[in-house]
């Protein structure tokens, strides 16, 4: 109590320095960790000026203020079962999948992640669906599920009058349930049924309540065909992540739960992460999305040239490419393909072979002990941005393990290239739909959902540390603390008529501001300390 009274007296004495002179007022600003304030705080662990702890605590304070300002707008959301994305190899078509929960009570689905389409759909009241039995898939240890709107207390069919119903032409009345039919790139591959509105269960990386029920629209997939029926691709549904209004990222952003952006991360061991609302890191490189026919309908980027090995970038190798996680591998226009593969084959020091059942032309033999030295493959993007492909090759396995590698690039059918999952591997790819740009930064896809900006431990790394290039930086954080300063703002001469009464109110305002600032400091310190435990 005595210490608090002393602080009050000190603040009153500081108020005396507020003086009146031709309507100019000054006030000394005292840094929160200054020696002057140290005597009144009573805190034993006062950080030494310019020490590591000194800067760490300033940074944590900035982060606390940032959280108060931005609230839910910057939170990362991910499926309630976790942010992990999984690849089951050839068993499920080489795509990445994540577990989601929908409905009440919640039902789990293993959905493929597809940045090239918009609709989320799951097998539902099936007329023609892929097998959902675990015995049909060597990678699964439990049966997959089928959804039924009648079994969910929060489910309702969308009517043809709903703004997200795009097939009104197939409706006989406005109150009829809205049908959908989506055709995909793969030949004769489609999903059809009815649109349903229900809850998608999500978790949050922030300190707010971690369980979030977001209302979304998805397809009750009654009938699948092609790869979705008999080739083991997306047997339990697919999540479209495209730019359309009906996609999950679009709906979450429109509802105000997240910023209009998401990220995908795939690593080389077949796992990865998905986050909604991820705005990326300061280490990200960026390139703008390119509109097609005057509008942004999918994620297209421009490639100025392709560089192979240590040679200069190849001439006349520019193209546009769709960035699509729904493709396992990468396709480039035929004329570019010929130049890239020729240069790659010239640079590699290995015997070229062919492997039955593999779609690639340029494959190379490798013994178990031999480490092939692959030439680098690099995409040069606008503004001289460089995208170095981390894993341009694909291993070929035999009875004795890896027997060779193939350059995992194929010819595109037309002029539009497709950048698939294999080119994205090793990067945290951010699809920034607010600013219409694509970002990438090296990552091993560790879980960022519980990432806290905590001070370093004695070993120099925070607990459960991410690699240096994965650690979030605090926007606006200063390496050097602001100096103790006074500022004398100019006052307009027209204010002189209010000189005497204004002087009183200015003094009162300064006092209240100082009290509020000190109260915030007094309150915030223990909160910050608790957050570090």
Image: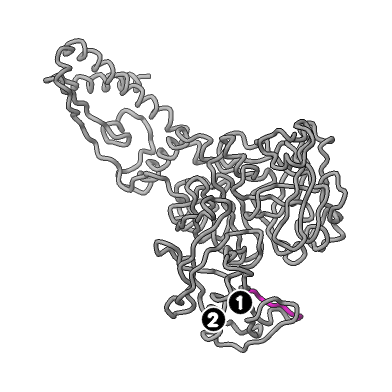
Q: Quadrant of residue 228?
A: bottom right
Q: Report the side of 237 relative to 458 (left or right).
A: right
Picture coordinates of residue 517, whole percent (x, y): 35, 26
Q: In the visual, does 307 lie left or right of 167?
A: left
Question: Can I make out residue 351 in this image?
Answer: yes
- Which quadrant holds residue 495? top left
Residue 79 locus on image (x, y percent): 66, 45
- Image quadrant in which the N terminus is located: top left
User: What residue lies at 54% left-to-right and 56% top-to-bottom?
Assistant: 429
Nearest the eye: 227 or 236: 227
Dots 2 and 1: beta carbons under 8 Å?
Answer: yes
Magenta range is 394-399
Q: Is residue 242 above or below residue 135?
A: above
- Relative to 498, does residue 146 appear above or below in the rendering? below
Q: Which residue is mark 1?
A: 407
328 or 27, which is in the foreground?
328
Considering every residue shown, the one lying at the far top of the view is 501
> Mark 2 highlights which residue?
344
Residue at x-position 18% and y-position 29%: 488
User: For the residue carrying disc 2, how many other residues have a C-alpha within 10 Å: few (<14), some (14-19), or many (20+)?
Assistant: many
As drawn, 473 above or below 319: above
Residue at the image point whose x is 61% and y is 84% from the top:
370
Based on the displayed image, in which of its 4 quarters is residue 69 positioned?
top left
Task: Return the x and y of residue 428 as percentages of the image width and height.
Answer: 54, 57
**Mark 2 vs mark 1, CA separation in Å:** 9 Å
Q: Earlier in the sequence, mark 2 or mark 1?
A: 2
Give the residue drawn at x 25%, y 31%: 29
Q: Give me the disc on residue 18.
A: none
Residue 23 part of the magenta segment: no
Image-based side of 154 in relation to 462, left or right: right
| Nearer to the camera, 54 or 358 | 358
**Predominant SS of the magenta segment:** strand
């Amino acid at each position: 109590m005595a210490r608090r009274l002393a602080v009050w007296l000190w603040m009153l004495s500081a108020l005396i320095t507020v003086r009146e002179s031709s309507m100019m007022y000054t006030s000394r600003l005292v840094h929160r960790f200054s020696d002057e304030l140290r005597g009144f705080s009573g805190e034993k662990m006062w950080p030494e000026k310019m020490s590591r702890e000194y800067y760490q605590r300033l940074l944590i304070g900035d982060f606390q203020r940032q959280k108060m300002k931005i609230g839910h707008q910057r939170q990362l959301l991910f499926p309630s079962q976790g942010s992990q994305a999984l690849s089951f190899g050839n068993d499920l078509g080489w795509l990445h999948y994540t577990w989601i929960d929908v409905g009440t009570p919640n039902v789990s689905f293993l959905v493929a992640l597809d940045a090239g389409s918009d609709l989320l759909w799951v097998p539902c009241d099936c007329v023609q669906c892929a097998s959902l039995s675990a015995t049909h898939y060597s990678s699964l240890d439990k049966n997959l599920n089928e959804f039924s709107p009648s079994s969910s207390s929060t489910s309702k069919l969308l009517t043809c009058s709903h703004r997200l119903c795009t097939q009104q032409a197939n409706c006989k009345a406005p109150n009829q349930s809205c049908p959908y039919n989506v055709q995909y790139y793969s030949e004769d591959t489609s999903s059809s049924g009815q649109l349903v509105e229900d809850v998608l269960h999500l978790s949050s990386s922030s300190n707010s309540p971690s369980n979030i029920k977001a209302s979304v629209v998805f397809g009750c997939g009654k009938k699948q065909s092609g790869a979705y029926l008999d080739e083991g691709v997306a047997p339990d549904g697919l999540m479209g992540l495209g730019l359309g209004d009906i996609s999950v990222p679009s709906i979450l952003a429109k509802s105000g739960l997240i910023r209009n952006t998401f990220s995908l991360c795939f690593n080389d061991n077949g796992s990865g992460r998905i986050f909604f609302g991820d705005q990326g890191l300061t280490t990200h490189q960026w390139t703008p999305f390119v509109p097609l026919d005057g509008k942004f309908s999918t994620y297209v980027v421009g490639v100025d040239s392709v560089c192979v090995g240590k040679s200069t970038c190849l001439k006349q190798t520019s193209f546009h490419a769709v960035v699509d996680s729904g493709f396992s591998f990468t396709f480039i226009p035929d004329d570019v393909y010929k130049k890239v593969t020729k240069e790659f084959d010239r640079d590699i020091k290995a015997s070229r072979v062919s492997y039955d059942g593999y779609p690639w032309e340029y494959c190379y033999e490798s013994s178990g002990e031999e480490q092939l030295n692959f030439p680098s493959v690099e995409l040069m993007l606008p503004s001289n941005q460089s995208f170095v492909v981390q894993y341009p090759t694909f291993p070929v396995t035999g009875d004795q393990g890896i027997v060779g590698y193939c350059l995992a690039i194929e010819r595109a059918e037309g002029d539009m290239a497709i950048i698939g999952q294999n080119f994205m591997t090793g990067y945290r790819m951010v699809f920034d739909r607010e600013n219409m740009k694509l970002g990438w930064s090296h990552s091993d896809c560790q879980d960022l959902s519980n990432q806290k900006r905590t001070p370093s431990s004695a070993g120099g790394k925070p607990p459960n540390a991410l690699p240096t290039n994965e650690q979030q930086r605090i926007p606006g954080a200063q390496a050097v603390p602001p100096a103790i300063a006074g500022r004398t703002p100019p006052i307009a001469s027209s204010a002189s008529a209010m000189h005497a009464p204004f002087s009183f109110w200015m003094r009162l305002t300064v006092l209240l501001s100082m009290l509020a600032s000190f109260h915030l400091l007094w309150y915030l310190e223990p909160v910050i300390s608790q957050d570090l435990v």
